[in-house]
Amino acid sequence: MSEQFSRRDFLKLAGLGAATTAILTGCGPASRYVKREPYQQMPEYNSVGQSTYYATTCRECAAGCGLVVRTYQGRAIKTEGNASHPLNLGKTCARGQATLQGLYNPDRVTDPNKTGSAMEWDAAIQVVADALKKYKPDEIAFLMGMAPDHLFDLVTDMANATGMNAPIRFGALGMFEARATLSKAAETLFGQAGLPFFDVGGAQVVLSFGANFLETWLSPIPYTRGFTGLREAKTKLRGKFVQFEARMSATGGKADEWVPLRPGTEALVALAIGQIAAEIRGGAMPKAFSSVDLLDVASKSGVKLEALEHLGELVATTNGVLAIPGGPALGQSNGLAVAEAVLALNAFAENIGKPGGVYLSALAPNQTEANRPASAKEMQEFVEKMASGAFKVLFVHGVNPVFELPKSIDFKSAMGSVEQVISFATFPDETSAEADYIFPDHHGLESWGYQRVATGTAQPVLSGAQPVVSPFYNTRATADVLIAAAQLAGGKFAEALPYKDEVEFLQTKVSSLMSESDGSFTAPDAFTFMAYFQQYGGWWKNTDARLSSGTSGILNANISAEEAQFAGEGEFFFVPFVSPTLAEAGANKPWLQELPDPTTTVMWNTWVEINPETAHELGLHNDDMVKVISEVGEVQAYVYLYPAIRPDTIAMPFGQGHTAYGRYAENRGANPANLLGGHFNEAGDLAFAGMRVKIEKISSAVSGVGLSRMESRMGVYGEALGEEH
Amino acid sequence: MIRPEEIKMSTEETGKWGMVIDQDICTGCQACVAACAMENNITFVGEEDAGYGRSMHWIRIERFWEGEYPEVKMTPQQPMLCQQCGHATCEPVCPAFATVHSQAEQLNLQVYNRCVGTRYCANNCPYQVRAFNWRDYQRPEPLPNQFNPDVTVRRMGVMEKCTFCIQRIHKAQDKAKSEGREVMDGEFTTACAQACPANAIVFGRVDNPESLVSQLSHKGHGVKHLEELGTLPNVTYFKGG
């Protein structure tokens, strides 16, 4: 398709007039020239007062929800969910809504630059080409985020053809979800690794061991939809939800029963419930459940025997029990045993591969096996290699490891041992601040691409992305930079990426789906196929491809009934959790900052949650400044008296504490990752919830200084900050 | 002087828009709050002003605590927004007629260019859902590129509140009129209801017995907040639990 081809001509050709659709397609390279025009001069496809809508994929996390973005005179005005997208069915979370504040953020990287001084793109591409040519392939490393997948595929193709190191992926959300543990536990159930899929909507009783599935966990939109299904009494009784966790999460706040067990005893409690249920039901006692002693569990976990018996009875007598392991429960030294113990409850409930039960998530259409982001252990190995000088050049895209990794994994120092670090950051984050070059990628809404939907829907989904506006700054698609640099570098690199640009690469990848059956659409030729791909926001199969043939062998496995080990000294268990509103990368969007946290209603800051009784004993009040000290570091934050946390536990949200990342994020709050030591579970995930910490009071609350909370507004008028004590 | 018998309470049902919110499935995720802010050009105010209760949320999620640890419980999340009262307490106290009742949509309007900032309406609102622009809050370039051209941008000294996305109502009505038909149920919805991942918010015509919202609101276990004050709110809540 030539560049002279106008958008209107293409629309006529493909028969996609406005009469047939409200969502326009980007249609190949032509739409790269979507222009932002002054309001007096309309581009031909705009008319005054009319909006144009483009389907694309959200990039605020890696779940891959479909968006439809309303644009007006070349500006993106509003994001909405794509109603026909199987993953989110027209819905979005708060972060998806606020993605426009990333696009129009006043602090973006505007030009390619070398430690702050701007350069031309030709020179930038030459730098990348030189790096590819100059070093041996095994001295070149790529570190990428969990999205987008098309770029990961492009770099993987490049690595396969040239012998370069395969790209490694990481994201703090994956770390706090303990994806490696989930994946490994799923292997014992289904015989293959991958993300388990929990059909919350079809269940009658849900037991969640720490899984924060209504916040940021794996794919929050479909899980929230599932929760609605659980609660709505349309075809069945209203479902019951029990949450086991030491600190009430926003998810736990919705539970009918909240069980504050002692951190580290999740596996014991799950096995005890299994044992009681198996006894009630009669027959042979499954080996997995036989090893625990109920009185011992009750004393260790702090959950009374009567409570355990009540829960066991619930499991034994209800049809449709579903148990979910997740979050802090897995981020402990015995995380894998927790996952296995909880999955054994599902095997006992005989729900493997049944509605209301556990499946293995469907693979995306262009995927042959599940891949997961690197575990923290694998990241530690990667950083050790960096520090040893094994890598001469490191490319970083879509991830901010200096901020996201635990303090014990010192990415920042290791960057010093790499000759050249090239960042493709869209925002000036902590990692790009340390890089030698920043060659900024477009924002997600200015980008082409696709994302494989890893879990959350029964169908295999490849979610499509296209630019909804023209790039606002002098940024360039990283795929285009790599393709151009590979051509310049020549040899195997040029052979690996024989494309004119990113769009041609995408067309090649996407058109391979044309021969697949049961697709959401078919097309006579590759161009039309690509046009539909953009118009619909992706391509998906109409079949349920979840793996449902699991074994219940886990019931006869030896599951360790040991408590978790805790690192460090101190009187408190420490629970870091991902901020439900900010997640890993939301802190630079002012409206996300001003969303009240669902549990504490705090805005714009970091807090330490302490049980009011404990605080009283320690002489602590709301808004006192305290220092939290772990074996590897310390951070300071305001005290928040939280009524729903164990007296022996304190908790902090992850998401704030940036030292870079723009005006709305910088020098605000504290980063609990700076407290995390390098302890891992058997699957290699970080034991982020397996630490003990101390707290020290620094200063007392001062009137007018402290946490900004929404809840104060709900009090009596004039109840200003800091006055309640 | 208006005599009491002349005061007309807006109990009529014609053209009446309403909402049903199911607190049992609301997860408090704040998607509606963000969606509302993005749709309606609502400004953020920064940490300090937010701490003084000056944040401009047109919808907020209330949550309260019951009991003490370990028997502590979070009450069902309660999204609180302008209830679009049929007999609104904010309306009679406005000296500038800036907050008036619309006969066409049965909504409480806020006419920004009439508002002189007395804040009487906010003081008189039992739901505390009105937000006042205490300053001209900064939205540095290029953030204003995102402005919704269908919604006025407010400045210092002006009161604002939820409008039930009246710009969307009008757009749908215009479209329906040009096609010679009535607005269909579910043809459009408010920004909060559109975003809600739990489907906890349903919006539509309460005067149409066939509409989803009116069927839900007549289900029996719905509650209207502070109904005893005689405000005739147009939002029905399901407490659930």
Image: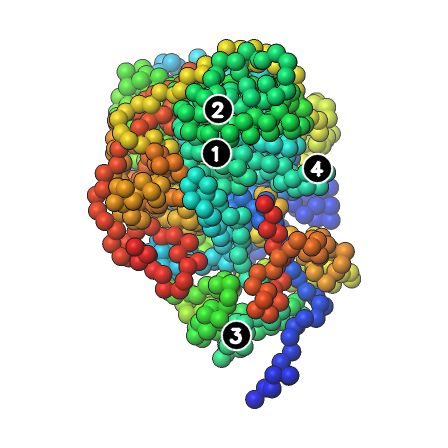
All told, the count of numbered labels is 4
Callout 4: helix, strand or loop? loop
Which residue in the structure is indicated by mark 2?
A: A269
Per the image, the residue denoted by label 4 is: A236
Quarter of the image holding residue B183? Answer: bottom right
Amino acid at circle 4? Lys
Q: Chain under label 4?
A: A
Amino acid carrying mark 1 in the image? Val
Residue mark closest to the camera, 3 vs 1: 1
- Residue type indicated by callout 3: Ala
Q: Residue furthest left?
A: A698
Mark earlier in primary sequence (2, 1): 1
Residue at the right extreme, as displayed: B180
Tell me if A92 is positioned left or right of A614 in this view: right
Do dots 1 and 4 share one subunit? yes
Q: Are the numbered discs 4 and 3 placed on the same chain, yes or no? A: no
Cα gap from disc 4 to disc 3, whole angstroms: 49 Å
First-in-chain label (1 vs 4) = 4
Which residue is disc 3 drawn over?
A: B98
Q: Nearer the viewer, mark 4 or mark 3?
A: 4
Circle 2/circle 1 CB separation < 8 Å: yes
The Cα atoms of the two marked residues, 2 and 4, are separated by 28 Å
Mark 2 to mark 1: distance in Å? 10 Å
